[in-house]
Image: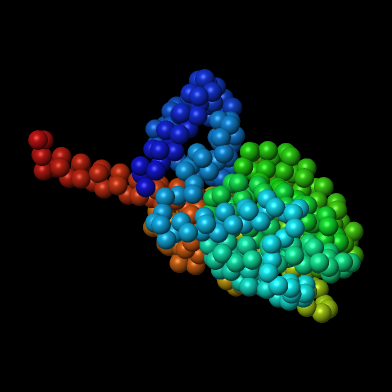
Amino acid sequence: MLEEAEEIGRRARRARLRLGMPQADLASALGKSQGWVSKMERGHIELDRVGLLNQVAAELHVHPNDLIGRPYNSSPDENQWQVAASSILRELRRYDLAPVFDGTPRPSGRLWQETTRLHRLRDAAANVAIMQVLPDMFREARALAELSTGHEREEAFAIYAVCCKFAHTAAHALGHPELVAMSCERAAWSARLSGDSVMPAVADWMRVWDMWATADWADAIALSDRAIASVQQGFDQGDPLATRAWGSLQLRAAVSAARGNRTAEAEERVGHARTAAERLNAYVGPPIYDRHSLTFSPGNVQIHAISVALEMGEQRKALAINRRTSRGLVSALPNSRQGHHHMDIARAWLWDGNRDKALQELETAERIAPQLIRNHPIARSTLRSIVYAERAATREKLRRMSDRFHLDG
């Protein structure tokens, strides 16, 4: 794993030299010292924040996945998801051609029931399984849209858009930038045809995530605000689905602001999201099916507040928020969000100098969401830092002991 850090540094150096960019120029663009860039290129400094990783990649005009070598090298069995990803890409490329589907597609009500399986897989962070389910779902939803009219056709496009969202999430987690980009484009296309007033905002929520890859923090906030405005009326009227989208977009804006060093705005956005979560908690009425698959709750707001603090380099604040957060709020979250949370807390403890607690949290994260954590660049960076620090500490202990024993040679 330590060799992985060195390889990331070598890729950064090659990208910089390809542009004819001196270390000093890259350092200036990043707000760092030339010594920092030199150490990063030698693998001695970890890119341990997503915002920092994306900023370095943006300045070097490469994709973050290319910089860190994602998808990571795995066994042939673990790489089988790429076969499913290729099938999904094929379906997305032929979105406006006659669908290839044998038989008669099921009605939209049945297909919505099928999406509950995808929700469960998403919650479990089973991204490979999501990839395997999606090709057939795309084909059937597209066939239904081709054969039906009116509301049924709109619902078929809504299902297609939600499938794009699942593909987008899984592709981000596994590291497939082409599928990330195309699923986002097709989500926007199908959302416009869905007749669902909230679905276009969900597609924009996906686009904001993609803007982070190029460190376009201001554009990400502007797009979030446009999407927020599109569901504002529903939010004002207390519509639960609009409220979920409104709150989720505020969290997207909060992370964008934190990465853009807009501290006050980041905290204000978290406050807005907390208001939306409280409104959802106070909702009284028939159960609402979260057809847009937006994980939004008071617990999700709390763990985003921790992430925002970490993106601003404030690990003690992150740990303080964590201490104030009810364990029940976190345990009520799906495994995918719990895994992210414990990964963040591991990073906070590491930055605070407690490697034992950092490793405990990272082990918890892996136990809860193994596929997600093993493929996450920040989890890998955190583990590398722990391993390196432990080896350095052991070397220092051995050096001191050898001095006491006068083992000069």
Hey, which quadrant is residue 319 in on the image? bottom right
Q: How is the image coloured?
A: rainbow
> In the image shown, does 5 or 110 lie closer to the viewer?
110
Apparent side of residue 289 relative to residue 35 in the rendered image (left or right):
right
Residue at image position (52%, 20%) is 20
Q: Is residue 136 above or below residue 2?
A: below
Total numbered circles: 0
Query: Where residue 368 sits: x, y (%)?
Result: 49, 67
Residue drawn 39% across the image and 38% down it: 6
Residue 102 seen anywhere in this rendered image of the structure: yes
Examine the rendering and report whether any part of residue 247 can be seen: no
Residue 89 location (% of width, % of height): 62, 53
Instruction: Tell me what residue is drawn at x 35 percent, y 50 percent.
Output: 387
Residue 393 place in picture, x, y as percent: 30, 46
- Quadrant hosting residue 288: bottom right
- 42 is higher (above) or lower (below) than 365: above
Left or right: 42, with 302 as reference point = left
Residue occupying image coordinates x 54% and y 26%: 26
Residue 276 x %, y %: 78, 62
Q: Is residue 134 left or right of residue 151?
A: left
Report the front residue among 141 and 376. 141
